[in-house]
Amino acid sequence: MKIGIRSWLDERFGLSGITDFLTKKTVPLHRHTIWYYTGSAILLFFAIQVITGFMLVLYYKPTLEMANESVARIMTEIPLGWIIRSVHSWSASFMIAFVFVHLLSIWIAKSYRRPRELTWMTGVMLLVVSLLFGFTGYLLPWDDLSFSATKVGTDIPRAIPVVGAWVTKLLRGGEDVTGDTLTRFFGIHVCMLPVFLFLLLAVHIYLVQKQGMSLPLEAEGRQEKPKEIPFWPNFVFREMIVWLLLIGILFTIAIFFPPSLHKVADVMAPAPEGIRPEWYFLFLFQTLKIFPAHVLFVSGETVAVLLIIFAGILFFFLPVFDNKPTQVKGKMITLSAYALVLYALIMSVWGLL
Amino acid sequence: MTLKRRATLLFLFTFLFQVVWAGTSLCYPQQAVEKKEASLPQKEETPEKIVGAPQNVKEKAGIWVFVAWMWISVFVLVYFLRLKIAEADRLHGIRFYSLKKD
């Protein structure tokens, strides 16, 4: 019966080609193999995001009058609604955390070097899309905190010379954060970003398959090939253990630490005390805060925003600047990765205080 | 059907049953609370903050049981997966997969 279904599907879809590929594909086994699991963990959290997102969108109403009320209904009336919302929210945080860890591991291992430059670049683009998911999703409950944070967040591009005001207007759908912004953010969150993410993910995964798994520098220079295991079933079974543990951790945290919903946003009210963005924007937010009002004759905010954009461009084009042969260690690059982590940690803690 | 497979299936079914049971136990008390609230006069003030939490003791107990079952299932599945990994590695060691391809 099982063989019959398999051969029926194989005849129509050519599945044997895929299974052949999966059994032939190998994964290097060394003391840094643990970092390979971060990629599939991101995929797992993204799948959870999609499933819980589908559930939430059945009850969420993206209008000025109904947004906060519909989220309150999800949390208080819909069976298991508060858990679904909590899982969606925590899964987003987990996903972004794993994207950071994944990129950082590649940065330190210099796995972005030839021929994997495009894999790195699509990875950075995936990080940006993930952050945009977080930014647009934060406004959707339309409570006073998310409203004020979005107001501050969408005001930042205004500091960019020439195009800044236009970008802010484009993001908000007008001069201020209104119902139009909410509808716009909802559309971006559930329609545009998923399409971008799926396309980027497809290219990224294709490139990973095409180039194969990268090796750490210490193994790269050796004459003998490192030990390898088949992707299916040996590596997939190992990944399944990681997935199970992550699902357990995610659900436990989501159940015991659910996100709260504040009172509905009042467009006319002043911003509440101590508004903060989500944790993954905290270091950028603090960077903007510590800059003086003026640097020489230029606004401090403009200098800070331009510096952040410049750092982002450097990060994106890292494989272009560091195009040394794979075996070269590149201590400065490693140090710069550690320095960035230290800076982000210090700024985030400072922002929380 | 081997003993291992039977045990896996048993745990999967009990886990699934637990999920359904938790779902229904979360549903009914909430509906009861809803009916009770409908008979009371509506309050004008909106709360400052809503925190997602179980509505009553039964729901709270259901959540604890669900979490316990989830972790038991995770550990049982991890145990079986470790056995599967050992077996897959053994087969890879004796070049079973490459022989199969030939």
Image (cartoon, helix red, strand yellow):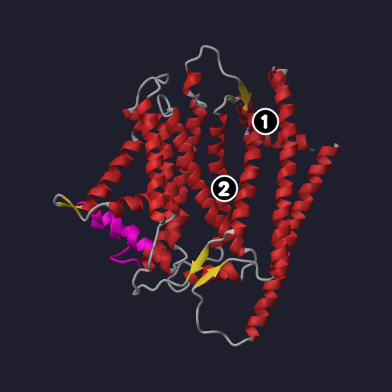
Quarter of the picture containing the N terminus of chain A is top right
The percent position of residue B90, horizontal first and vertical second, equals 73, 23
Place residue A158 in its image quadrant.
bottom left
Where does the magenta region start and end?
A149-178
Decide if residue A307 is on the left or right side of residue A236: left
**Displayed quadrant of residue A176:** bottom left
Residue that badge 1 annotates? A233
Q: In this rendered view, identify the residue nearer to me: A242 or A136.
A: A242
Q: Numbered disc 1: what chain?
A: A
Tell me what residue is drawn at x 29 percent, y 56 percent: A156
Count of numbered labels shown in the rendering: 2
Q: Marks 1/2: CA distance? A: 21 Å
Question: Viewed as shown, does residue A15 lie left or right of A129?
Answer: right
The kind of secondary structure element at disc 2 is helix
Picture quarter containing residue A272?
bottom left
Seen in the picture, residue B31 relative to A94 is either above or below; the reply is below
Are discs 1 and 2 both within one chain? yes
Q: Chain of mark 2?
A: A
- The amino acid type found where label 1 is placed reads Pro
* A200 or A177: nearer the viewer: A177
Counting other residues with Cα less than 10 Å from the Cα at mark 2, is it few (<14), some (14-19), or many (20 or more)? Answer: few
Q: Amino acid at mark 2?
A: Ala
**Badge number at residue A79:** none
Let me know if residue A154 is in the magenta part. Answer: yes
Say which residue label 2 marks: A47
Specify which label sits upstream in the sequence, 1 or 2: 2
The residue that appears at 37% across and 43% down in the rendered structure is A343
- Determine if the magenta segment contains residue A283: no
Q: Is residue A203 visible?
A: no
Q: Is residue A89 above or below residue A328?
A: below
Between A14 and B6, the one nearer to me in the picture:
B6
Q: Is residue B66 left or right of residue A315?
A: right
